[in-house]
Amino acid sequence: MAERMAEAAGPGQPVVAPTTATVRRLLGIALREPQALPELSAPELDLCLRLLRRARLLGRIESSRRFTHPVPDILRSARVIAESRARVARWEMDRLAWALTGVDGPVLVLKGCAYLLLGTPNATGRSFADVDLLLPAEALPAAEAALKARGWSATELTPYDDRYYRDWAHELPPMQHPEREVEVDLHHNIVMPTGYLKPDAAELIAAARPIEGTRFHALAPVDMVLHAAVHLFYGGEMDGSLRELVDIADLLQHFDATEPGFRDAFWPRAEALGLLRPAFYAVRYVERLLELRLPAALAAAPARAAPSRPVLALMDALVPLALYPYHPERRARSATAARQALFIRSHWVKMPPLMLARHLGAKTLARLRHQMRGSGKGEPGAAG
Amino acid sequence: MSTGLDPDTFESRLAGPGLGFRVGPFDLFLKARVKGLAAPLARLYRHYPVLDADRVFSINLTIHDVWRPAWRDRRRVRVLVDGQQPHEDMPAGQALAVLEWAQNLVIAMRFHSFLMLHAAVLERNGHALLMPAAPGHGKTTLCAALALRGWRLFSDEFGLLRPGGADMIPLPRPMPLKNASIEVIRQFAPGVELGPEIPGTIKGTVAHLPPPADSVAAAQRTAPAALVVFPRWRADAPLTLEPCHPAQAFMELARNAFNYELVGEAAFQSLRMIIDRSRCFDLVYSDLDEAIAVLTRLADDTDG
Amino acid sequence: MSVRWRSPSDGRLAWAEYGDRFVVYHRLSSQTHFLNAASAMILQDLLSQPAGLETVHAALVQAQTDAGQAGADEALPPAVLRQSIAETLLRFEELGLVERIDEP
């Protein structure tokens, strides 16, 4: 895992060492003391902004008169994108509420949409992509029908993928209204039923709280944090997931400050839902990678939450590499390998190994057939 | 060659630590390690102020050769923006065109502090002329011709403005002439200097017209929108200039924008201001000089 | 059951008027819509109070008469006009420009 040397500088050319340590230092300043950013040297600030963009955290930084050209435009542009996506997400939820008026029972919004509707601190400047809804399994057919009646349609999938979603994944195939470019995912649990983690969806829904002024519910605070942890460590992709770790940190601090009893309820609830392991990783890496001191009651994980020593050592080595964006001037082979290793691992955790071989095999076969037919559309490259 | 830099220094800086350029409102940092690219690039960029590297840049872009021995003669170039590829590798012979299009891509995807209309913009007599048009209607050719006849070039592609206002912002860059337009402009302005002809691109053969020196020199000076003209070149057509309904013009401007909906209400307000302050026309022409004459008259007749 | 619709008075729309054509910006959705005079009239005037299809139809017929619209493309036969209004109301509802009020 040797890192490549810095390039030779030109005359009078200031150089910021393209090391992992630099990446972490600069991102740490941006996350913990953003008011210090205008004091960075210009090359450091340039690098910092590029890293923030890669990590999808650029929208968090407030512009100010202390920044000089072209920084205000860079920050304002990121904010405009985030505001636009927030508007789009709110509007999609407005239309979903309209479409689902006839459907009984709670409808939970998950992740970014929940943060947006609740106004949690991490919602500012955050980019949303899809709308994720959680409903009781028995309500899904009525919800799907209601959306179709109002114009949403399911994404076209191969029969294999369609079955993957319905039987194995915890969601219906994604739906989209043709006039808006927003994917709507209807889930009946937060983790795949064939996976190793099996939280009780009914428990999550029973504890959900209505979001005032809306038709929707949100997960209870501890459950919301646990969901973010599950999604980060067991979700299947970890590229640029530093943003999700930051979400978890923000939520932990926010709920600890505003939710009476939050810190004492955290570990018992994690245990009750069978989510001790993701909770363990969340707390560990929030403290270690983001250098945050959490209150003792939160930081002190029960011993049974930890994985075996070898697994922990592996995770300690891989997670930082996977979460942090690599320096834009270097191609860190180690980071890519780390991400791939974690991707395979989290897929294994989602689906028992036998099923995994079949799943990956079938997808590979389908892809191969597609390519051999010369339709010309290969896999997307390492594109941003 | 480029301001203060001899060709060898330009090439070695570009291939080594990189070079910074001020291009309108954007500070571009470029590293290029592509055989044969430095010399034509130096000529096309020669009027841009060169910036020292001790600053924050709007865009950091790298383009370099990629050798694939298995493909024998198919040398490719790769563009990297902040370490990521925005598109697949392209044939090396198209490097100059690819570099210009990559900048378009980054600008359009990133800089939403601006409202970005898909339009050619030029200034005359203190008034900005906007020419939104779908591709293939001859907008770039007409834009190039106007620039060669003394109109100040803002852009052949991006109508930039601050959301909420109606003042156009220059972004003078090389203008990519395509296919038959190359010869048209050679005839129109004998002896005009163009970049190399690049065959085989997705748009055919492309050659770039460098941005005029005084357009680049004046790039920090904005101008209020005053004329919106939808040009359409049609072979042998007599020139017609018809007023365009303002609601129609509004709709076309909105449809021909890179980020109208993304910018939100301030974009709506900007278009409202542009339409309120501008005369709007549909123009059909076959002769460049006639089109230029009519546009020049419009600009000179505009009050304020 | 009778259905009525209403334009919410929450300032969700910004208007630009150009003679007989209107451009309206819908703040909540960030969408921009281009309307002719009849649609604009429905949205701006006729639904400022809750109104159903019959009310809107009658008002537009009256407006056509007042404007002396003979032979203009806005002067549709009543049945076609009614159908067109019904579609417009449903479309406005789908776009979130107006709200539906169902009454038993």
Image (tube, coloured by chain):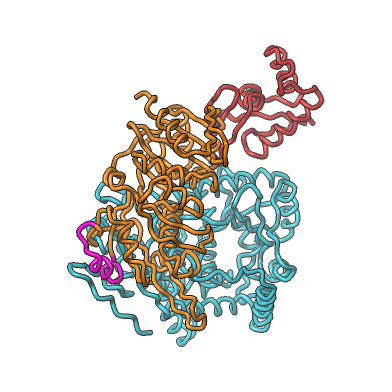
Chain colours: A cyan, B orange, C red
Q: Nearer the viewer, residue B283 or A218?
A: B283
Residue B13 included in the magenta stretch of the image: yes
Measuring from the top left, give residue C34's x and y in whole percent: 60, 33
Q: Nearer the viewer, residue B278 or A14?
A: B278
Q: Is residue B1 left or right of residue B274?
A: left
**Which residue is found at the position 18% from the left and 69% from the top?**
A11
Above or below residue A84? Residue A39 is below
Residue C101 included in the magenta stretch of the image: no
Of all residues, the one furthest to the right in this rendering is C79
Measuring from the top left, give residue A254's x and y in whole percent: 42, 56
- Image quadrant containing the N terminus of chain B: bottom left
Above or below residue A50? Residue A196 is below
**Which residue is found at the position 34% from the left and 24% from the top?**
B304
Q: What range of the chain is rendered magenta?
A: B3-18
Above or below residue A99? Residue C91 is above
* Occupied quadrant, residue C81: top right
Measuring from the top left, give residue A79's x and y in whole percent: 41, 50
**Which residue is found at the position 79% from the left and 31% from the top?**
C1
Measuring from the top left, give residue A237's x and y in whole percent: 53, 71
Q: Is residue A161 left or right of residue B301?
A: right
Above or below residue A325? Residue A113 is above
Of all residues, the one furthest to the left in this rendering is A12
